[in-house]
């Protein structure tokens, strides 16, 4: 799994002009799944993200986690994170998982975030054309891989 983590003050995702997911302070996660990913991969990634200390404490040090600040998460599936651009000008997506297994694993990942103690976990609509809006806090963006 590959995830782009964006620390946000707010984020939302629309499908066909309707908001399907919206959060305040927390993380916008752009999440890609590859063929080798399993539920174990998703569990490890959810645990790591819930405890990732990138929020500022009272001394302005990044010592606080999503759990510490009682933040929210917006998960948006993004198979394009596995784009291969080494040949030609048109990306290949052969490393992205098949949609059926990717959708199932992303659903499992969302459930794991909730079981890690994240009270509010929203998501986009798998396979839909989505419009994502965010106010990146910092900006603070991290790319994380879990295998």
Image (tube, rainbow, N blue to C red):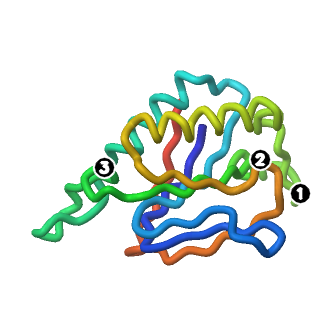
Q: Residue 90 bears which disc, if any?
A: 1
Q: Quadrant of the N terminus?
A: top right
Residue at (42% x, 73% y) in the render: 9
| Tag 3–tag 2 contact (CB < 8 Å) | no
Q: CA distance from mark 3 to mark 2?
A: 34 Å
**Between 111 and 63, which is closer to the camera in this rendering?**
111
Identify the residue position indicated by label 2 in the image. 84
Q: CA distance from mark 3 to mark 1?
A: 40 Å
Whole-percent x and y of residue 2? 59, 43
Whole-percent x and y of residue 80? 75, 52
Whole-percent x and y of residue 129? 82, 62
Tell me if mark 2 has few (under 14), some (14-19) or many (20+) residues whose alpha carbon lies within 10 angstroms of its own: some
In the rendered image, which quarter is residue 101 located in? top right
Q: Quadrant of the C terminus?
A: top right
Of marks 1 and 2, which one's residue comes earlier in the chain? Answer: 2
Of marks 3 and 1, which one's residue comes earlier in the chain? Answer: 3
Left or right: 120 with respect to 85?
A: left
**Between 48 and 85, which is closer to the camera in this rendering?**
48
Tell me if mark 3 has few (under 14), some (14-19) or many (20+) residues whose alpha carbon lies within 10 angstroms of its own: some
Identify the residue position indicated by label 3 in the image. 67
Q: CA distance from mark 1 to mark 2?
A: 9 Å
Residue at (44% x, 58% y) in the render: 72
Residue at (57% x, 55% y) in the render: 122
Q: Secondary structure at mark 3?
A: helix
Q: Is residue 18 above or below residue 36?
A: below
């Amino acid at each position: 799994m590959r995830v782009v983590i964006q620390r946000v003050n707010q984020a939302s995702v629309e499908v066909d002009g309707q908001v399907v997911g919206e959060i305040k302070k927390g993380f916008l996660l752009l999440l890609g799944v590859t063929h080798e990913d399993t539920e174990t991969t998703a569990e490890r990634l959810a645990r790591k993200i819930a405890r990732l200390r990138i929020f500022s404490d009272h001394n302005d040090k990044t010592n606080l986690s999503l759990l510490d600040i009682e933040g929210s998460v917006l998960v948006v599936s993004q198979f394009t994170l596995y784009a291969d651009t080494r040949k030609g000008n048109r990306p290949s997506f052969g490393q992205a998982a098949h949609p059926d297994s990717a959708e199932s694993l992303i659903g499992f990942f969302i459930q794991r975030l909730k079981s890690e103690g994240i009270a509010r976990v929203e998501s986009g609509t798998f396979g839909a054309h989505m419009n994502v809006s965010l106010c990146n806090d910092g900006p603070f963006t991290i790319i994380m891989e879990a295998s």
